[in-house]
Image (cartoon, rainbow, N blue to C red):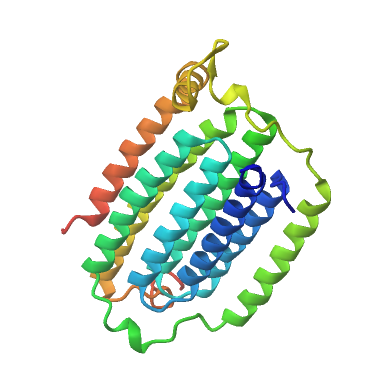
Amino acid sequence: MLEITTTHYLILSAILFTIGIAGIVSRRNMITVLMSIELMLNSVNLNFIAFSYQLSDLGGQIFSIFTIAVAAGEAAVGLGILVAMFRLQQSVELDRSTELSG
Amino acid sequence: MEAVAAWGPAILFYLFAAVAVAAALAVVTLRNPMYGAIALLTCFLSVAALFFLRHAEFLGVVQIFVYGGGIMVLFLFVIMLVNLHRLHESRLFAPHGAMALVLALVLVALLVLIVYPLGFPQPDPAPASFVAVDGTLAGNSQAVAWQLYRGYLLPFEIVSVFLLVAMIGAVVLGRRD
């Protein structure tokens, strides 16, 4: 209880990851879905940091920098898609964009 | 004083973990995306604090800069750009929202069942490898930079190309034609 181990971090990361997944599959608002994806990437970073500390290896921290860079690019492109979608159909609700489902 | 040194990290961990989980739940459940974005910011800052607790000081600051600064401004800007007043009348969750909740509970139970019995040994409280460059004490930022530019130079350059591609893609997608 007193000592914070890697297991604590892994369980917290699992909880945050699952909340992100629940947000992605259950929400209709695309902005919230994108935010849930950021939440999941963040929980993955938490895992990397926990194992980096556990193994005394900086590689985890380096990889987290790459994950953050990819998350930034993903947010930019995702929000660009969102703006384009809003311009097209005046809505950001995901179940309204059914143009591709034959 | 000794009690603070012994209990401090545990109390801080539980505090920031609770704030992070509560903020994450708020992101998923709040109706107004603006409040959701603020909750997401709270979650990012708590996770940054958890990074600090694991001797990843440079990464904690990067987290605050990139997530709390860059990505959050992007989200808030788009939320303001997209007129959301019609969203308030519609349903919040997709029709299969209840199934998603069950799925999430099963998934978290599974993950905890896998992770909990592993039982990691208590790591070194002040790992020298996070702050040392060639045997001399330098600090976390310098150690990360040393590792990044010597061992991971090619991935670093690839990420810069990736960011350029993402930027061009975002500009093309957001263009008015």
**Position of residue A75 measured from the top left corner of the image (x, y, whole percent):** 37, 53
Q: What is the quadrant of residue A51 in the picture?
A: top right
Residue in the foreground of this view, choosing between B67 and A95:
B67
The correct choice, above or below, for B49 with respect to B162 in the image is: below
Residue extending farthest to the left is: B177
**Position of residue A43 measured from the top left corner of the image (x, y, whole percent):** 56, 52
Residue extending farthest to the bottom is: B89
**Position of residue B105 measured from the top left corner of the image (x, y, whole percent):** 69, 71
Residue in the foreground of this view, choosing between A67 and A83:
A67
Total numbered badges shown on the rendered structure: 0
Q: Is residue A27 left or right of residue B102?
A: left
Residue in the foreground of this view, choosing between A90 and A99:
A90
Residue extending farthest to the right is: B117
At horizontal 49% and vertical 54% (from top left) the residue drawn is B46
At horizontal 27% and vertical 70% (from top left) the residue drawn is A86
Q: Is residue A51 left or right of residue B81?
A: right
Residue A14 visible, this angle: yes
At horizontal 23% and vertical 68% (from top left) the residue drawn is B80
**Position of residue A58 measured from the top left corner of the image (x, y, whole percent):** 58, 27
Q: Is residue B7 left or right of residue B61?
A: right
Residue extending farthest to the front is: B1
At horizontal 43% and vertical 44% (from top left) the residue drawn is B63
Q: Is residue B56 left or right of residue B33?
A: right
Indicate the quadrant containing the N terminus of chain A: top left, top right, bottom left or bottom right: bottom right
Residue A69 visible, this angle: no
